[in-house]
Amino acid sequence: TLYMIFFDSSTRTRNSFETGITQLGGHGIFLSPDKMQISHGENARDTANVLSRYGDAIAIRHCALNEGNPYIRDVAEHADIPVISMQCDIYHPCQILADYLTIKEKFSGRTKGLKLGVAWTSAPNYVRPLSVPQSLILMMPRMGIDVTLAYPPEFKLMPEIEEQARANAKIAGSSFEITHNFEDAFEDADMVIPKSWGPLMTTTDTPEGLNLIEKYPSWRCDAEKMALAKDHCLYMHPLPADRGREVTNEVIDGPNSVVYDEAENRLHVQKALMALTM
């Protein structure tokens, strides 16, 4: 039995985990904190200990800044069963495993020396967490992939994560660079992942953050940007994408788009993760 605690909404994560555990012969139980005693103040220790007596693993999505990762770690410290991060304010490990599997599939297992462009895009519908770009820059250089990270000055990531990415690249013999020029992420790229995240290292005020996002409408992936990349360049996105703002339909629905392959691979990598840990 897998207990799935979602502090945040989900389409791909919930359904891929729930489908995956079912295909493995298990059972997934969806838990919403507002329907649990968490809503009345029950702490992570008690929640972890009780669920450990009933099931085989706990999976948690909690993306609130400065709350999500500490909560997942607190549960993991007190649980007697595996605890899986389904995304927090710092990391999104399962998404990045799916991204890497997709890249390996498309390049016949060869990843060393490929260039990945990770670029911020303007999506003013809500302030998104930092976890996807941070996880990308941490993992991909370790796999020998050269990463260019592009964002406007107000949209920097956590400094300790950027430093770790530099260290990972040095150890692996790959490269990691940061630029404030959108086009640099696309230039000669083999894969691009242009997606939005909030200016959370600049401000935690939501209206101010949305105003900053609106400041850069030209940071959008379109055919002109994709033309800067290699002909085979993959367009990737963890979804949901803000169509028309982050990316044009021409690109996301085009022949180089692998967004649905990425989404499918969430199922496969998470089944592997559960099979290895439960």
Image: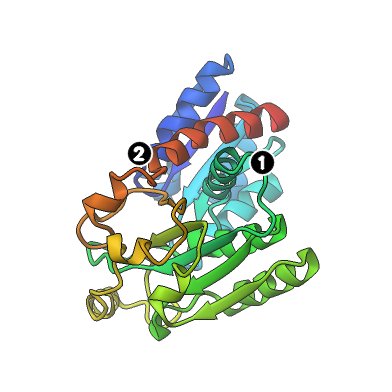
Q: Amino acid under label 1?
A: Gly
Question: Above or below — where is 64 with respect to 251?
Answer: below
- Give whichever of 253, 52 is nearer the camera: 253
- Which residue shows up at 56% across the image and 30% down it? 268
Question: Above or below — where is 195 with respect to 240?
Answer: below
Q: Quadrant of residue 170?
A: bottom right
Q: Is residue 277 left or right of residue 8?
A: right
- Residue 117: % across, % down: 49, 65
Q: In this view, does 228 lie to the left or right of 123?
A: right
- Give whichever of 234, 266 is nearer the camera: 234
Q: Amino acid under label 2?
A: Thr
Q: Judge whether residue 202 can be spotted in this image.
A: yes
Q: How crowded is mark 2: few (under 14 residues within 10 Å), some or many (20 or more)?
A: few
- Image quadrant containing the C terminus: top right
- Give whichever of 209, 223 is nearer the camera: 223
- Residue 166: % across, % down: 68, 74
- Which residue shows up at 36% across the image and 48% down it? 239
Q: Identify residue for label 2.
A: 11
- Residue 5: % across, % down: 47, 40
- Image quadrant containing the N terminus: top right
Q: Which residue lies furthest to the top in this view?
A: 25
- Residue 78: % across, % down: 69, 46
* Label 2 or label 1, whichever comes before in sequence order: 2
Residue 109 tag number: 1
Q: Distance between the residues labelled 2 and 1?
A: 29 Å
Describe the element under mark 2 as helix, strand or loop. Answer: loop
